[in-house]
Image (cartoon, coloured by chain):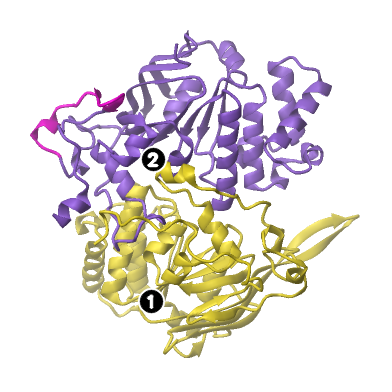
Amino acid sequence: MRNPVLKVEDLSVHFEVDGESRWFRREREVVRAVDGVSFELGAAETLGIVGESGCGKSTLARAILGLVKPDAGRVVWLGDNLIGLDEDAMRKKRRELQLIFQDPLGSLDPRMTVGQIVGEPLRNFFPSMSGIQVRERVAGMLKMVGIAPELINRYPHEFSGGQCQRIGIARALVVNPRLVVCDEPVSALDVSIQAQIVNLLKELQKKLQLSLIFIAHDLSVVQHVSDRVLVMYLGKVMEIASRDQLYADPRHPYTRALIEAVPIPDPVAERARQRRALGGELPSPTNPPSGCVFRTRCPYATDDCARTTPPLDEIDEGRRVACIRQDVVPTGRVLPKPPRSGAVE
Amino acid sequence: MALLEVRDLTVTFDTPDGVVHAVNGLSFDLEPGQTLGIVGESGSGKTQTALAMMGLLAENGRASGSVRFRGQELLGLSTSEQTRIRGSKISMIFQDPVSALNPYMSIGEQLIEVLTHHRNLKRGPARARAIEMLRQVRISDPERRMRQYPHQLSGGMCQRIMIAMGLLCQPDLLIADEPTTALDVTVQSQINLLMGELSEKSSTAIVLITHDLGVVAGLCDKVLVMYAGEVMEMADVEPLFADPAHPYSQGLLESVPRLDREDSGILRAIPGNPPDLVSLPTGCPFRARCDYAFDACTEHPKLEPFDDDRWKRCFLESRPMPKSSEENA
């Protein structure tokens, strides 16, 4: 990629947890929540990150923002490695890197008014701004996310979930960040409201030329918002590709399984699908399978998959896949090509 | 006779802010073996409908109207009569499987209790039946799982155990409230395949409460679309998805991003927010968010039949035009 704004190189985050107790001693075990993840993100680009719970998507986001300390690797933001920066230097960078949370109401302080919530980052990063300037900027920001500025003195509990998420977005964007990490921003919302928020994020991204990392477990939402998509499993990247490549021809068996599992709201097509549910459960992250971590649930796994960790190879322009069984993995769309619907221009 | 006849079910809650009108005159029938999907946004009354049928409303809740199960009125039953029906003839699966199970009891104890309590089985046969049921819901190594506690199992496994528990007494009716919402897609698809198989094999009727229209499309025979505690539209699953007659059903279907359609770049959101259940608007509750609202909508529309066994609560004479094709025209 030419001139990426963000380069994540071989990033690993490990946690120590209590393991099984043996006699009177507790063994310490290591969870490799993020294990050697690398990717790049361009200016004004949206990267979707998908995977099941426990795959490390949120930890990856937190490590990029410096909220957890990685054990190895680099996070290069506009040429500077963020890992190892001291508090003061990191604080300056934080203005450029913002986060939108999953729980819209829970991520807003219940004792602060909307005006205080959205104004706080401004007072924090721009202490020289006058009260009037802050109030004007906050009012403008609220308007931009679709909250009437008259509501500035209300408290979070007076708003619906969708409105709270709009306020969360305003708080993230008020300091003019360049990168916004959205961690499951719509999964707590109803579909009709989810669509409002997704549309708002897309619109703001275009208007403000933001780079977005959009973490979600919903593959249809990710398809809708992303330029490129990264698929994670047990802390590792399974596949990263452009949105169109990934959905038109998913090359990793895990990506295919994820898409296969999504139910489609069309009774005739849904019942006609020959679906094979992905068997088994997510292996314990303290004791991941040897070789390819997905092999215990993969229909194409062989003994070789247990022996070698598959490299994340570039198999096409812009597409990397960590799978050594490319010769047998089916190609093409998982879902049949749709008839052109009326909704398409 | 229908297995379940719900007539004019109304659920209200007394709260410090006023009376919350959660369900407002809901009526439907369910035939034996049928799967009914109830869809709608949060606050549309889906869960309270289920809880009212089970007699599990919170203390400040009141249900009126009628819920007849095999002809027997369920509302107003004494606690002991309710307990006899719950778990044996009607069972329920909740959204959060881990907290719906008792953390202090092993899986085995919880399953065995259902049978010793409702079927008067001795522990031995109850245990054998429980293990067989765990096998049916594809729990690996069931003997070992019987000794384990809920926190030792994954969410997907706990939900399969809830399903096993719900089906132990071969109930006539299973109420599943968002059974897969808390689960990952791959696990969700395992559970849905399982529920589909079980409903085919047994004659258990299912009321499936969900906001996921894809799940409804896969599992249900009939759909009931709820908004502000009322039925907006009710029909068999195929006509409803192919040709939604109520603007709200249409809005729901259009607001979902889909993997099986080409992406048009923008989602059709339903503007605004659901109404306040303490002070419901007069007239059609959806009119403030409806693109087709006109003068008549200030009156309250009735749920009226049209076509072949379809029902809608809307004054529009013809079907709402799909928004997209309207724009193209």
Q: Residues within 10 Å of mark 1 (few under 14, many from 20)?
A: many
Q: Secondary structure at mark 1?
A: loop
The hue of chain B in the figure is: purple
Which amino acid, by three-letter code, is at mark 2? Ser
Q: Do badges 1 and 2 share one subunit?
A: no
Identify the subunit bearing mark 1: A
Residue found at the very far right of the displayed protein? A23
**Chain in yellow (letter):** A
Q: Are marks 1 and 2 in contact (CB under 8 Å)?
A: no
Q: Is residue A226 visible?
A: yes
Dividing the picture into quadrants, the one containing residue A101 is: bottom left
- Between residues B184 and A33, which one lies in front from this camera angle? B184
Residue occupying image coordinates x 27% and y 53%: B268
Residue hosting label 1: A45
Q: CA distance from mark 1 to mark 2?
A: 33 Å
**Which quarter shows the N terminus of chain B?**
top left
Residue occupying image coordinates x 16% and y 35%: B318
Magenta range: B293-311
**Which quarter shows the C terminus of chain B?**
bottom left
Q: Is residue B185 above or below residue A201?
A: above
Residue B297: within the magenta? yes
Position in image of residue A76 (x %, y %): 51, 85
Residue occupying image coordinates x 79% and y 65%: A28
Q: Residues within 10 Å of mark 2 (few under 14, many from 20)?
A: some
Which amino acid, by three-letter code, is at mark 1? Glu
Nearest-to-viewer mark from 1 and 2 = 1
Q: Is residue B311 above or below residue A9?
A: above
Position in image of residue B103 (x %, y %): 69, 38
Q: Secondary structure at mark 2?
A: loop
For this view, does B284 lie left or right of residue B50? left
